[in-house]
């Protein structure tokens, strides 16, 4: 994934099946210079076609779609265009849906009640490598994985991650963005991305959130 100058707005594809909600989201996003909407879709199949054609950097995606749902869209998108970040924006706020979305490759998960500023900040954060989970959801979600972690008292690393890679994952697990990890570890942001891509390849995942979840399961990191 190429580095993007801070002055360039993030290219966003919006996927929402309810016409009025779609209109509202498009209007909302148009007010923020940090993002530019390159297109929209009202079903999953169209969303994948538009993503291939328009090459967005972030897909803002509803889960409740006709035909292919948001989880399936995320899975297929990540197989075809792994460089595209996915931010889920939906009415569901239960841990199971969050888990399914993250397992599919989503980088963040917000519910539709959040203010517009938070949606835009979420887009910025997922693009910069951060993890986006609404506070109440995040607490329940990570508590679940801490309970799983407690069952794995002895850390196990089946991927042979290096010390540097483990340190990087631990910072990511704390919610730091790529830029913040770079500052803490005194390495460039693009170097952080390179290390993350190596970690993903070793662990067989597509996103930092999936990597953290697996590392938590094996007792390698804490949140």
Image (cartoon, grey):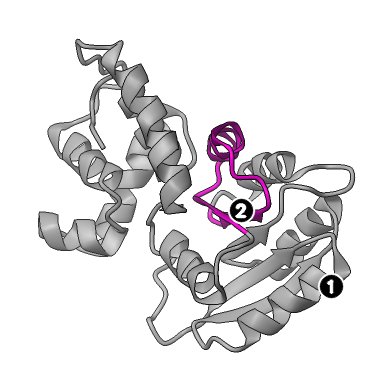
Q: Where is residue 72 drawn, in percent x and y?
A: 73, 39
- Residue at the spot of label 2: 88
- Residue 108 painted magenta: yes
Is 213 above or below relative to 92? above
Quadrant of res 16? bottom right
Is 180 above or below relative to 12? above
The residue under the point 62% across, 51% down is 81
Count up the numbered dots.
2
**The C terminus, quarter of image:** top left
- Residue 215 painted magenta: no
Is 201 above or below relative to 121? above
Compared across the picture, whether 132 is left or right of 41 comes to left
The residue nearer to you, when weighing 58 against 203, is 58
Compared across the picture, whether 51 is left or right of 182 comes to right
Compared across the picture, whether 160 is left or right of 60 comes to left
Q: Secondary structure at mark 1?
A: helix
Task: Choose mark 1 or mark 2, whichever is in front.
Answer: 1
Q: Where is residue 147 drawn, in percent x and y?
A: 34, 20
Quadrant of res 27? bottom right
The residue nearer to you, when weighing 218 against 93, is 93
Quadrant of res 48? bottom right
The residue under the point 39% across, 31% down is 213
- Residue at the spot of label 1: 20
Going from N to C along the chain, the mark reached first, 1 or 2, is 1
- What residue span does the magenta drawing correspond to? 83-111
Real-space Cα separation, disc 1 to disc 2, in angstroms? 18 Å
The residue under the point 72% across, 47% down is 63
Q: Secondary structure at mark 2?
A: strand
The residue under the point 49% across, 69% down is 118
């Amino acid at each position: 994934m190429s580095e993007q100058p801070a002055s360039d707005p993030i290219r966003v594809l919006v996927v929402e099946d309810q016409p009025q909600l779609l209109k509202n989201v498009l209007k909302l996003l148009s007010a923020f210079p940090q993002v530019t909407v390159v297109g929209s879709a009202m079903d999953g199949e169209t969303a994948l076609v538009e993503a291939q054609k328009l090459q967005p950097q972030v897909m803002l995606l509803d889960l409740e779609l006709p035909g292919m749902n948001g989880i399936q869209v995320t899975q297929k998108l990540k197989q075809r265009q792994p460089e595209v970040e996915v931010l889920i924006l939906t009415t569901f706020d239960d841990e199971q849906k969050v888990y399914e979305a993250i397992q599919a490759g989503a980088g963040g998960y917000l519910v539709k009640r959040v203010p517009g500023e938070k949606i835009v900040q979420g887009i910025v954060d997922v693009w910069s490598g951060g993890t986006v989970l609404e506070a109440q959801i995040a607490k329940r979600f990570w508590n679940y994985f801490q309970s799983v972690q407690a069952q794995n008292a002895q850390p196990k690393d089946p991927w042979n991650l290096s010390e540097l890679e483990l340190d990087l994952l631990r910072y990511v697990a704390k919610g730091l963005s790529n830029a913040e990890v770079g500052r803490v570890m005194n390495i460039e942001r693009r170097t952080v991305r390179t290390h993350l891509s190596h970690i993903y390849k070793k662990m067989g995942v597509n996103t930092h959130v999936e990597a953290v979840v697996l590392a938590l399961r094996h007792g390698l990191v804490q949140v």
